[in-house]
Image (tube, rainbow, N blue to C red):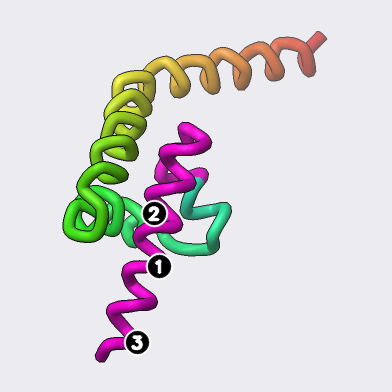
Amino acid sequence: MENDLAYLKERVMMFGNYIAEHGATVRQTAQKFGYSKSTVHKDVSERLRDFSPSLYEEASAVLAKNKAERHLRGGMATKRKYEARIKDEN
């Protein structure tokens, strides 16, 4: 049980540090470490608060910023998709 908690804390802190240091999204963090987006999100949005309140605040600020910008990234991806399609047609 103690080893499970140590492993959980290490994983949660790893995710929180990566997001805070790199401004990474949940998806980028999950891909980097080979975990699901659900695991990363739950660890950072719920469990991190118990292990490190200050890191939780930093990571939460990054996630809030990413969420606010999400629609812009989606719009840019759509724009690139259609620009590539037009280029291929010409």
Front-most of residues 52 and 20: 52
Dot 3 amino acid type: Asn
Question: Quarter-wise, where is residue 62 in the image?
Answer: top left
SS at mark 1?
helix
Number of marks: 3
Q: Where in the figure is residue 68, as x and y percent of width and height?
A: 30, 20
> Element at badge 2?
helix
Q: Mark 2 points at which residue?
A: 37
- Local packing at callout 2 (Cα closer than 10 Å; few below 14, some 14-19, many 20+) is some
Q: Which of marks 3 and 2 is nearer the N terminus?
A: 3
Residue type, label 2: Lys
Residue occupying image coordinates x 82% and y 8%: 90
Residue 19 included in the magenta stretch of the image: yes
Image quarter where the N terminus lies is bottom left
Question: In this picture, which residue range is highlighted in magenta?
Answer: 1-28
Residue named by callout 1: 10
User: Is residue 73 rendered magenta in the image?
Assistant: no
Q: Name the residue under label 3.
A: 3
Q: Which residue is drawn at 52% across and 19% down?
A: 78
What is the magenta segment's predominant secondary structure?
helix
Of residues 77 and 31, the one drawn nearer to the viewer in this rendering: 31
Percent of width and height locating residue 2: 27, 87
Q: In this view, does 20 lie to the left or right of 45?
A: right
First along the sequence among labels 2 and 1: 1
